[in-house]
Amino acid sequence: MKKTDTIPEIVTSLLQRYPVEGILNLALGEAVIVVRSNSSDLLNTLHTHFKEFLGPETQADINIYALEGEPEPLPFTFTKKQPDPGKTRIKEEFVDIAGGRIVRKRLTDMVLMFDAKNHVAVGPCLANVNQVVNFINNRFIEWMLKRGSLLAHAAGILFQNRGLALAGFSGSGKSTLALQLLCNGASFVSNDRLMIEKHNDGLCMYGIPKHPRVNPGTILSLEFLQGVMTEEDREATMKLDIETLWNLEKKHDVIVHEHFGEDRFKLSAPMNGLLILNWKRTKKPLIISEIYISKRRDLLNAFIKSPGLFFIPEPNAPAPDFSFRRYIEMLSGCHVFEATGGVNFPEAVWFCRNFLEQDEQWTDFQTIENKLPE
């Protein structure tokens, strides 16, 4: 590999070393994705993860190569990506070449490269399947953004043909609330990434096929998740103080079809409302109020998600509009609520169920502090 190589040239070289042995066909919403790999074990693992979103053999919108191999030596000068707010460890570095981008995961030596047509994950994929899954989902996200969607940092659930997005600042518990709503009959749309679009019949949200990832504190607090952790991990975690427990970065996957049954994972739903969790771990009562998001731009920071390293605009096309103004315009079509006071999941579940069970004419604009069940 030379510094002057383009991504298509690099891909050609990789495929000579790692010839494809099989494919996986996925249908994510309207996008057809074909994943090709030199590893049948990797394809089988991805098949299990994406089992509810397998698609027919047809022409692909996105072609992805997932190549199991050794860490790839790269002769480029990389730029370190600074960690997100609240994080300290630098995990990624990147370089842009000839209309494309190469991202290297510093902790795993996975290399992820893409341009308008080529999408490749290469390295120790089997040891880092979660990063391969994320890469596949990121290619889907980019496809959605290029057709006009906005990206949100939110979970999504569906109940009785009505959908609710759940947002909040880091550690607010949106995944925990989503899981508790699944226990109450809701279907799962997405864990922490939503794309939103406005159609003629209202606002819609689209998820990604990634199962909920929850921290040990959530697992210990929900009896039905006890099997997610080993007995050894559970015993060690129970010895931690509450602040350390809730700040652990180690997370565990909750496979939706294993814990809640088949056909409970949907990738699209109407977006009738947005609940922003701005509560704290205090003994104060929970208050949920409907707000005008145009007057609470501070809360948009909990909902807006930057496309990050894995999005490159179309060459010679106008830059996409990811401004606050456009998010406010998009959210004008749904009800937005803020949860303040103390964290109280049972009361939050009651509110979400009550909202989703209403007909389309939700008319209660009052603070519901005194309406929550005792």
Image (cartoon, rainbow, N blue to C red):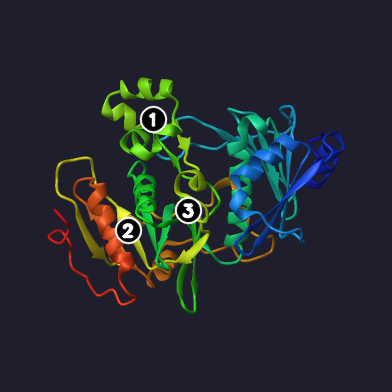
What x and y, as percent, mark residue 50? 61, 48
Q: Residues within 10 Å of mark 3 (few under 14, many from 20)?
A: many
**Residue that numbered label 1 is attached to:** 248
Residue at image location 30% in from the left, 61% down from the top: 353
Q: Quadrant of the N terminus?
A: top right
In front here: 322 or 249?
A: 249
Mark 2 against mark 3, which lies toward the viewer?
Answer: 3
Q: Which residue is mark 3?
A: 190
Q: Secondary structure at mark 2?
A: strand
Query: What separation in Å lies between label 3 and label 1 (alpha carbons)?
Result: 22 Å
Residue at the far right: name it: 16
Task: Give the amino acid at mark 2.
Answer: Leu
Going by the numbered disc 3, the residue's amino acid type is Ser
What crowding class fits label 1: few (fewer than 14 Cα within 10 Å), some (14-19), or many (20 or more)? Answer: few
Dot 2, crowdedness within 10 Å: few (<14), some or many (≥20)?
A: many
Look at the picture and state if 62 lies above or below 30. above
Classify mark 3: helix, strand or loop: strand
Residue at 17 percent across and 58 percent down: it is 372
